[in-house]
Image (spheres, helix red, strand yellow):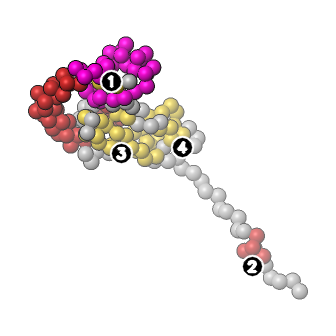
Amino acid sequence: MKIILKKDVLGLGYKDEVLTVKDGYGRNYLLPQGFAVLATEKAVKQLNEELKQRAHKIAKIKADAEAQAQKFEGVSLVIKAKVSEGKNIYGSVGAKEIAAALAEKGLEIDSKLISIKGVKALGNYEATARFHREVTVVIPFEVVNENGEAAPAKVEEPKAAPAEEVAEDAPAAE
């Protein structure tokens, strides 16, 4: 089934794209929710005409998105979290925490524009901020202990020497 998206649908496509989807997905989800319309010849011609007329507006929107994305270039974050005995944190770090940390630096962004995979341990990670279909920024961040430590201090025990080395050091009994 060919459809024209009326809104951005995460994982599928962006507004005004003509796509082919499975019949059930289009008929039972996209069309009733108002996310898409059928891509008939008339609808496609009308879409092409609208896109021609909106070309300069689209270019301005993209330029604005690029300007906003430029503010986020070179930004790195440190997010503090409560940590268990190991490196695991209580809960997880998500888009809301990233947006809050950016707001502290004076960079406002909607948390819905940030995508991040589940962060459940201390370490360095990356989040992706999507400002436009063609404009994304990678935001590196580090999750540290509330105390500011990058990782909980671990006491390393001296390793026992392998049996081969012990045999070489022992005097030969003859």
Name the front one of labels 1 and 3: 1
Compared with residue 25, is residue 160 higher up or lower down, i.e. above or below? below
Question: Where is residue 110 shown, x and y percent of the image?
Answer: 29, 28
Q: Secondary structure at mark 1?
A: strand
Which residue is under mark 4?
A: 87
Cα gap from disc 4 to disc 2, whole angstroms: 39 Å
- Tag 1 residue: 3
Q: Nearer the viewer, residue 51 or 157?
A: 51
Earlier sequence position, callout 1 versus callout 4: 1
Residue 38 in magenta stretch: yes
Residue 66 shown in magenta? no
Three-letter amino acid code at the position of disc 2: Asp
For discs 4 and 3, the disc positioned in front in the rendered view: 3
Q: Look at mark 3 in the image and give the residue it sits on.
A: 140
Viewer-nearest residue: 19 or 65? 19
Q: Is residue 96 visible?
A: no
User: For this view, does 157 lie left or right of residue 8?
Assistant: right
Residue 131 sits above or below residue 162 on the image: above
Q: Which residue is mark 2?
A: 169
Report the Cα–Cα distance between label 2 and label 3.
50 Å
- The first of marks 4 and 3 along the sequence is 4
Which amino acid type is marked by label 3? Pro
The crowd level at tag 3 (other Cα within 10 Å; few <14, some 14-19, many 20+) is some
| Mark nearer the N terminus (1 vs 3) | 1
Magenta residue span: 14-43
Disc 1, disc 2: CB below 8 Å? no
- Residue at left offset 31%, top offset 19%: 38
Q: Quadrant of the N terminus?
A: top left
Question: In the image, which is nearer the foreground, mark 1 or mark 2?
Answer: 1
Among the 4 quarters of the image, the one containing residue 165: bottom right
